[in-house]
Every structure is written in structure tokens, then in C-alpha cells.
Amino acid sequence: MEYIYQFLIILSVTFAGEILHYFIPIPVPASIYGLLIMLLLLCLRIVKLRQVEKAADFMIEIMPLMFIPGGVGLVTAWVDLKPIIIPVTVITVLVTIIVMAVTGKVTELVMYIDRKWGSANERHND
């Protein structure tokens, strides 16, 4: 029952993202709106991490299964993909490296900020 409750919270936030996508005329995917809403709700502690953590972990664990239909789609599109396979491969590798580097730098920044704020909060609380 706990998983259903947590999944319903995530589903509600996703639905809110879909509604925002429908009404805001900016080319931003609905999933991004949903992620921003969830981030805001978590940061403001309206939704506690424990209220969505188990369902989110479960969905992350099954995420690789979601790529199977896309992989099968690539196999069926091989005739169209064959002439451009080298540029697509180069672009995919480059973008993957760029995303990994940016993710690492953002993580380092977040950890740095957390250390700075954490030590400031500890001094303030003493």
C-alpha cells in the first residue's frame, strides 16, 4: 500500500507537469516541468523524501526495461540508420562525454555548497 501511495504522489506531480506543459506556450517537455515541481516540493518540504523514496527507487531499478522498445525500434529502422551510423555514433559518444562532465561538475558544486552551508549552519546552531 505504501508503494501505491508514493507512486500516486509521483503521478500527481507528473500530471501537474503535463497540465503546465499544456497551458504554458514554451517548448519545454512536460517531464521537465514535473521534475521542477517535484524539486520545489522537496526543497520546500511540502513532500518529504520518505514519502516518495521507495517508489522512486523502484522506478529507477526498472528503468532499463523502458529502453527495450527504443532498442527494438532502432533494429527495425536499421535501413534508414545505416547510411548515417558514423555521425550518429560520434555525436552520441561526444554528447555522452559532455553530459558526464557537466553532471560531475554540477555534483562537485552541489557538494561544495553543501559543505559551506553545512559548516555555516553548524556554527550558527552552536
Image (cartoon, rainbow, N blue to C red):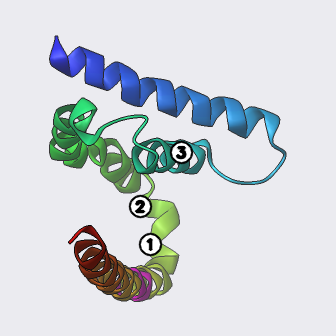
Q: Where does the image place residue 6, in percent across and percent down from the top left?
A: 28, 24
Disc 2 versus disc 1: distance between alpha carbons? 6 Å
Secondary structure under tag 1 reads helix
Q: Single out the mark in the foreground, 3 or 2.
A: 3
Residue at point 51%, 78% (across, down): 84
Q: Give the residue drawn at x 43%, y 25%.
A: 11
In the picture, residue 120 is in which quadrant? bottom left
Q: Position of residue 77 (x, y in %)?
A: 45, 55
Of callouts 3 and 2, the N-terminal one: 3
Name the main secondary structure of what is drawn in magenta. helix
SS of the residue under disc 2: helix
Q: Residue at x 31, y 86 (%)?
A: 112
Residue flagged by tag 1: what amino acid is it? Answer: Lys
- Residue for badge 1: 82
Q: Which mark is residue 6?
A: none
Task: Tell me residue 26's x, y (percent).
Answer: 80, 52
Q: In the image, is 124 to the left or to the right of 76?
A: left
The residue under label 3 is 31
Q: Which residues are magenta?
A: 94-99
Outermost right residue: 25
Q: Are marks 2 and 1 in contact (CB under 8 Å)?
A: yes
Q: Say what amino acid the circle numbered 3 marks.
A: Ser
Location of the N terminus (image quadrant): top left
- The residue at which mark 2 appears reads as 78
Q: Does the magenta portion include 92? A: no
Compute the Cα span from label 1 to label 3.
31 Å
Q: Is residue 87 visible?
A: yes
Q: Is 97 colored magenta in this rendering?
A: yes
